[in-house]
Image: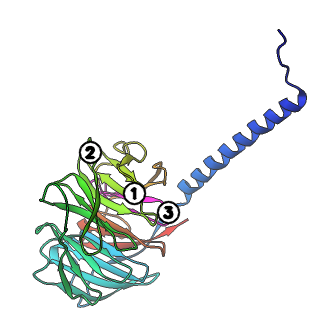
Amino acid sequence: MRHPVSTPRRATARSLVALLALAAGLVVASDHLDAAESVKLRHVTAIYLDDKGAGLKHPEGVACNDRGTLIVADTGGRRLVRYSVDERSAKPVGEIAGAELQAPLRVRVTSRDEIYVLDGKQRRIVRFGANGASRGALRPDGVPGEPTIVPRSFAIDAEGTIYLADVFGARLLVLDAEGRYQRHLDFPRDAGFVSDVAVDARGTVFLLDSVKAVVYTARKNAKEFTPLGKDLRAQASFLTSLAIDARGVLFLADRSGATLLLLGPDGAVLGRQLARGWNEGLLRAPAQLCVNDRGQLFVADRGNSRVQMFAIVR
């Protein structure tokens, strides 16, 4: 039986293919390493006061948009404080307070400056217009199954769709802007405790499981969540909040470790930044995070009763 023999031309072609594959792998690896090394946080300023000179009290929530609006959920003060943000500073421009707010924990602001805030004590989401006028509580309508809903966190996409993490029903509810039920996704069966939710520009949803230290993801219209990378228990103490920037980098607040953990779009760990302390640029019990398309990151620095502003530098 005659065995085929590789000709020099075939051997050369195979070698070329192998070299091209190796080069492609090196390029991908190089891009990944560059991304890991280049994503840095540069401290810009710290925010302590409202427009009347009164200090913040253990703020747990922070929200921002690309119009230069920053909303702080001043949890200890039972109010929301609004700021106008530029590249270097945040100017206080008023507050929202009243019976609607008892324990504001998580806050989101839309592209139209409409404000949604989760009140942890009342276990409901309260809405305010761009002028600060109350629009009442968001009341999910038409949700099937278990009628009791206990929101832990929520996110809003560019179209106004609301993604509500219902820890009582162990599900993510997808609602329209008025609270009408669209669909839902069950939490993963082995999930520990889902503490936060985020959504990117493509409609991909991210869930943060604080107990298991896992980020789960579901693409738009997906029917279930899948883990994004491995569990993060070796890299973090207790993750409680996440935000995602326009390039797909995830920023996770490690509340117990007083740092931020950065992940790439594929879930790869890009490193830890910041540390525990009282000086500006350091953290104590970081809570909610917010990222805008201006390349600004805001951290509700609860333990230091302030909000810190960083520039994302690449």
Give how far apart the Cα atoms at labels 1 and 3 are.
33 Å
Task: Tell me what residue is drawn at x 29 percent, y 44 percent.
Answer: 212
First in sequence, mark 1 or 3: give its number.
Answer: 3
| Name of the residue lying farthest toward the top | 1
First in sequence, mark 2 or 3: give its number.
Answer: 3
Name the residue nearer the viewer: 255 or 294. 294
- The secondary element bearing badge 1 is classed as loop
Task: Tell me what residue is drawn at x 49 percent, y 50 percent.
Answer: 266
**What x and y, as percent, mark residue 290?**
36, 69
The three-letter amino acid code for the residue at tag 3 is: Lys
Viewer can see residue 278: no
**What x and y, as percent, mark residue 304?**
26, 69
First in sequence, mark 1 or 2: give its number.
Answer: 2
* Residue 231 vertical placement versus 305 (above, below): above
* Residue 250 drawn in magenta: yes
Residue 297 falls left or right of residue 173: right
Q: How is the image coloured?
A: rainbow
Q: Which residue is mark 2?
A: 191
Splitting the image into 4 quarters, where does residue 220 fall?
bottom left
The three-letter amino acid code for the residue at tag 2 is: Ala
- The secondary element bearing badge 2 is classed as loop
- The secondary element bearing badge 3 is classed as strand
Q: Which mark is residue 202?
A: none
Query: Magenta part of the protein: which range?
Result: 240-261
Residue 111 falls left or right of residue 128: right
Q: Which mark is residue 221?
A: 1
Closer to viewer: mark 1 or mark 3 = 1
